[in-house]
Amino acid sequence: HQFGARIVDAAGKTTDVWTKNKNLKGNSAGKWIQADISLAQWAGKTVKIELWFDVAVKFPKEDGYGLIIDELRVLGACK
């Protein structure tokens, strides 16, 4: 499965800021991982943060959990 986070700006342009294939080497072996993402280039702008999960492929012995996110924090100025 592929998953990640992307930024969508006011014009609708998307920018991937974290993806499994690019940022996670191997797999998490069922353990929590911490991912820190800088949003500095969008400072002072209105954006959406999208978290996505691709379920197009079902693997044998799929446990059905998909993507689980815990303790999501946005630090800094927000409206």
Image (tube, rainbow, N blue to C red):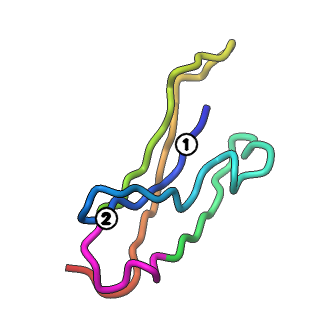
Q: Residue at x 59, y 37 (%)?
A: 2
Tell me the residue that label 1 is attached to.
3
Q: Name the residue under label 2.
A: 9
Quarter in which the N terminus is drawn: top right
Q: How far apart are marks 2 and 1 (CA)?
A: 20 Å
2 or 1: mark nearer the eye? 2
Local SS, label 1: strand
Q: Earlier in the sequence, mark 2 or mark 1?
A: 1
In x, y percent, where is residue 32?
A: 64, 53
Of helix, strand and loop, which mostly describes the magenta segment?
loop
Q: Which residue lies furthest to the left in this view?
A: 79
- The span shown in magenta is 39-47
Q: In which quarter of the image is residue 46?
A: bottom left
Give whichever of 35, 70 is nearer the camera.
Answer: 35
Question: Neighbour class for label 2 at 10 Å: few (<14), some, many (≥20)?
Answer: some
Q: Is residue 50 magenta?
A: no
Please give left or right for residue 20 compared with residue 66 in the image: right
Which residue, as the protein is rendered here, is positioned at the far top? Answer: 60
Nearer-the-camera pick, 10 or 7: 10
Kindly indicate the quadrant of the structure image that contains residue 41: bottom left
Residue 79 at x, y = what percent? Answer: 19, 79
